[in-house]
Amino acid sequence: MALSDYTVQNEVDTRSGFGAGILALGRENPNVVALCADLVGSLKLDDFIKEFPERFIQCGIAEANMIGIAAGMTIGGKIPFATSFANFVTGRVYDQIRQSVAYSGKNVKIAASHAGLTLGEDGATHQILEDIGMMQMLPGMTVINPCDYNQTKAATIAAGRMEGPVYLRFGRPKWPNFTPADQTFEIGKAVVMNEGTDVTIFATGHLVWKALQAARELEKNGISVELINIHTIKPLDHAAVIKSVAKTGCAVICEEHNYIGGLGSAIATLLGRELPAPLEQVAVNDSFGESGTPDQLLAKYGLDTPDVIAAVRRALARKK
Amino acid sequence: MASIEELQRMATQVRRDIVRMVHAVNSGHPGGSLGCTEFLVALYFDVMKHDPKFSMDGIGQDLFFLSNGHISPVFYSVLARSGYFDVAELATFRKLNSRLQGHPTTHEHLPGIRVASGSLGQGMSVAIGAALTKKLNRDNSLVFSLHGDGELQEGQIWESMLFAPHHKVDNLICTVDYNGQQIDGPTEKVLSLGDLEAKAKAFGWDVMAIADGNNMAQVIDGLNEAKSRTGHGKPVFVIMKTAMGAGVDFMMGSHKWHGVAPNDEQLKAALGQLVEEKDY
């Protein structure tokens, strides 16, 4: 596919993609169960609960217990999705995930909505920007950050079908839905959205859309951009990253996360070892967020389309 | 069904295993292990329906979760003595490349372990989850768990304490090893649990007591009583009084033996006391 092939079908929140995905998964596999910590509406679980009331566990505002229960439910064959805001199912319960889920190798899916700055007006208490870092440091944890409704739905189904713990990250705001509805989602496989030769943009989550906008703008100015959607941060598609940067010679990494610990860190580690190349990041500069609309926050914290374009120009300037 | 005398003999054997294991690596937690020996022996040699041909899912079997994972020596000994793995493997406890890690784990695939524990307060949630799955699977077997009294200071425990009665998890028997000791001293001094029985009742549990958790007959009777209380809409909470270090006189009743191994001389003395069935 090429840049022009991606058209916006509608604007819809990625969490609704999760809601649709877990409903489809529930119909496919009777062992799929959902847990929530008093945020059913926010997680778009209403349809699942309506259809499978006995397969939903309301845990109340007690996330640590929810993670432990999810770990226990795998014993006997259930596939639990433990759901809440990203802040409350990662940092708040890191030790529960570490010991009862990751170290114990449990088939628990942690479904995290309202990740990043685009949560908006609730402010920094809820806008986690460190979750990818925490989750990808856990041995055996798969970390997925899909970019739109269609991809979140597909990722949810794929996460339910794989064996092992998964951290699935998505968001709150209405967002352009531009990837194919019938896409096959392969965990750990990067999606090359556009082939190019001058620079590679690696993007994950909501910022894939910003990167797509930037790539279109750059191509108009004669810069050939390879755009790669890294929906799976761990395991990272090493071959795809190396192959692309070997061709383009520089990289820009875009994510709605602290620049420390996220996709940028993962790719920088890989390139530093295998293929040193100029690398620029579009990410939050080691700070907390604040209240505001998603658009205002992305602009203020340097995660908007012009920021991607500026990062590409910096990367190109550093190329020999 | 084993006789009380046979179970007591097994408890003595398990105690010998415990002191040998911690002595061999000069580390580990003998105090709580010795205190919970009757309980673990009763569960695995009499009370629970279980199969040493281990399967993680444990369909149709009673399950046990050790939440206070530091008393791994008693758990490992009981698992080995009931046939989950070779008794000789106890000698690898806490050594490099062993399946018998300092705290129980699933990572090394030791038969009998269903979740890692060690970081405290997590086992009740896991036991509740396993019990919920049994209900969804229409599996009538039971879920048991053991918790330290000091461990109840963890906040997650009280999340679990709220949850289980609310969701009528009545196929669950959670036992507290009430030995009154923790690392920094008596629990009463470190952070008092207050009236634990009243607290558990107020949270909606069916609460009962085992007055002497180091008396095999009382433990068997108590656990059978707990079993008879399952299936009536409430989770069962057993407050079991034990003596830390029970069975070895110089280790008994003091927090000092929480996480300290005996030296050569102390091992000899301990083994000298652990020779035949005794009424601890």
Image (cartoon, coloured by chain):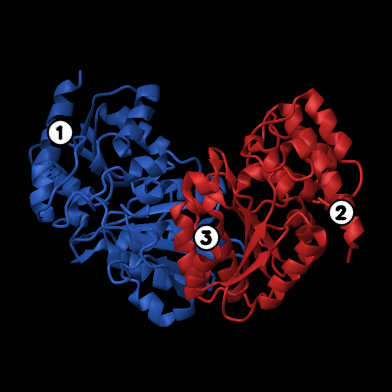
Q: Secondary structure at mark 2?
A: helix
Residue nearest the observer in this picture, A197 or B56:
B56
Q: Nearer the viewer, mark 2 or mark 3?
A: 2
- Is A234 situated left or right of A230 in this image? right
Question: Which residue corresponds to mark 1?
Answer: A311
Q: Position of residue A264 (x, y in %)?
A: 29, 35
Q: Where does the image place residue A134, in percent across and percent down from the top left?
A: 38, 41
Q: Residues within 10 Å of mark 1 (few under 14, many from 20)?
A: many
Q: Label 3 near label 1: C-beta < 8 Å?
A: no
Label 3 is placed on what type of residue? Ser
Give residue B37's position: percent from left, percent from top: 76, 50
Please state the chain letter of the residue tagged with numbered disc 1 in the rendered image.
Answer: A
Q: Nearer the viewer, residue A151 or B15?
A: B15
Q: Chain of mark 3?
A: B
Q: Any mark on residue B125, and which? A: 3
Farthest residue toward the front? B189
Residue at (13, 54) in percent of width and height = A294
Residue highlighted by disc 2: B8
Label 3 sits on a secondary structure element that is helix
Circle 3 Cα neighbour tier, 10 Å, few/some/many (<14 / 14–19 / ≥20): many
Query: Is the residue at mark 1 from the same chain as the one at mark 3?
Result: no
The letter of the blue chain is: A
- Mark 1 or 2: in front is 2
Q: In the rendered structure, which amino acid carries the disc numbered 1?
A: Ala
> What is the chain letter for disc 2?
B
Which residue appears at 68% of the width and 33% of the height?
Answer: B94
| Tint of chain B | red
Residue at mark 2 to residue at mark 3: CA–CA distance: 31 Å
Q: Mark 2 is on which residue type?
A: Gln
Query: Is residue B159 visible to us here?
Result: yes
Q: CA distance from mark 1 to mark 2?
A: 73 Å
